[in-house]
């Protein structure tokens, strides 16, 4: 069995020792090649080339951003997809994820341990036993995502956190909380919600201040606590949506409190829930922040979301 290990050397919880131990462990089970990412988008390029060369498994050591890039590389491998006659998961290399970031939402949603040593042990057992799971993905225009996407307030908070990290701040629950409060106070969208959501054959949902899309649950974690706007979301079904009608301080604060103190599923007249959706489009009256899998991707005015069932095999 041939495998490629993609290493993000800047991942939060990795070290040279981590990488050396992981390489030795994987080489006991597979014929392994190792590549290090050097820039944004590099993991996608490397994963795409690996799929087209016939690699059986792509292993990532990094955070959710590295996983997202690797998935997009796999899902757009032209040499593989040109001969596709059934579900992509049958012809694409499998994906194995060793948690190396600060949050690791995707790995934890799969039930993998947070610790990279224990995660590696699970992956080795899965490789030796041929154990895998087929999952669905989400797609936003031409880019795939594994666990979540967002437009509006959600993505604006991600942007603030990324800017703070570039200034040397550490990603912590406190940083996220301060970013949410700061965005609520200074954001311009409270009085004029810019987003609407359109579905085939259904009335449009206008005047939305933020739209959170989930491909699985939870949406994210704050430390050990899962945050679950749409607790029914699953890799085995379509996309789930939670959106807020407007961003009034009182209603938004109540929703945040519900997310922090309950098992998710916030309620209220200002909350919109959609479950198991095949496709929909989010349209903005002015450019809005946009994020996929916790990665800020700039501003958009229109994004088409699609559920892609049985898209990828993952070692678990």
Image: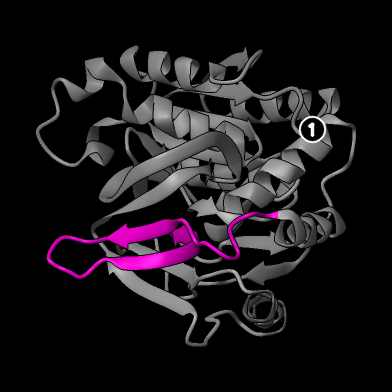
Image point (23%, 37%), residue name: 88
In reply to whether residue 198 is colored magenta, the answer given is yes
Q: Is residue 51 above or below residue 86?
A: above
Q: Residue at x 62, y 60 (%)?
A: 220
Q: Position of residue 154 (x, y in %)?
A: 60, 56
Q: Position of residue 213 (x, y in %)?
A: 44, 59
The quarter of the image holding the N terminus is top left
| Quadrant of residue 185 within the rendered picture | bottom right
How many marks are shown on the rendered structure?
1
Toward the viewer: 205 or 272?
Answer: 205
Left or right, 220 with reference to 171: left
**Whole-percent x, y for residue 89 in the image:** 28, 40
Position of 19 with respect to 53 (left or right) is right
Q: Is residue 268 magenta?
A: no
Q: Secondary structure at mark 1?
A: loop
The residue shown at (64%, 15%) is 39
Inspect this view and state whether residue 13 appears.
Answer: no
Q: Nearer the viewer, residue 97 or 195?
A: 195
**What residue sits 50% from the left and 51% below the top?**
151
Q: Is residue 203 left or right of residue 230?
A: left
Q: Residue 205 in the image: x percent, y percent? A: 32, 68
Q: Residue furthest front?
A: 191
In the image: residue 27, left or right of residue 46: right
Question: What crowding class fits label 1: few (fewer than 14 Cα within 10 Å), some (14-19), or many (20 or more)?
Answer: many
Q: Which residues are magenta?
A: 187-215
The residue to which callout 1 is attached is: 14
User: Does residue 231 lie above or below 82 as drawn?
Assistant: below
| Residue 73 visible in rendering | yes
Query: Which of the pair 167/18 is nearer the observer?
Result: 167
């Amino acid at each position: 069995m041939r495998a490629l290990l993609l290493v993000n050397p800047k991942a939060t919880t990795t070290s040279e020792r981590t990488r050396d131990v992981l390489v030795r462990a994987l080489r006991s089970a597979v014929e392994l090649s190792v590549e290090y990412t050097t820039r944004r988008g590099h993991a996608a390029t490397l994963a795409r080339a690996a799929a087209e060369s016939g690699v059986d498994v792509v292993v990532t050591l990094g955070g959710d951003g590295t996983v997202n890039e690797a998935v997009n590389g796999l899902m757009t491998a032209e040499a593989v997809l040109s001969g596709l006659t059934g579900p992509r998961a049958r012809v694409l290399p499998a994906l194995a994820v060793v948690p190396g970031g600060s949050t690791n939402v995707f790995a934890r949603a799969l039930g993998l341990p947070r610790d990279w040593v224990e995660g590696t042990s699970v992956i080795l057992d899965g490789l030796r036993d041929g154990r895998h799971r087929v999952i669905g993905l989400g797609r936003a225009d031409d880019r795939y995502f594994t666990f979540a996407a967002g437009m509006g307030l959600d993505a604006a908070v991600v942007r603030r956190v990324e800017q703070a990290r570039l200034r040397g701040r550490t990603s912590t629950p406190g940083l996220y909380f301060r970013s949410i409060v700061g965005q609520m106070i200074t954001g311009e969208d409270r009085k004029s919600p810019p987003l609407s959501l359109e579905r085939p054959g259904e009335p449009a949902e206008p005047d939305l201040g933020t739209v959170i899309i989930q491909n699985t649950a939870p949406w994210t974690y704050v430390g050990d606590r899962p945050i679950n706007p749409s607790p029914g979301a699953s890799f085995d079904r379509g996309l789930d949506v939670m959106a807020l009608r407007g961003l009034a301080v009182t209603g938004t604060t109540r929703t945040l409190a519900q997310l922090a103190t309950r098992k998710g599923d916030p309620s209220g007249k200002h909350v919109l829930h959609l479950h198991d959706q095949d496709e929909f489009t989010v349209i903005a009256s002015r450019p809005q922040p946009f994020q996929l899998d916790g990665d800020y991707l700039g501003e958009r005015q229109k994004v088409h979301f699609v559920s892609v069932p049985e898209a990828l095999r993952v070692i678990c």
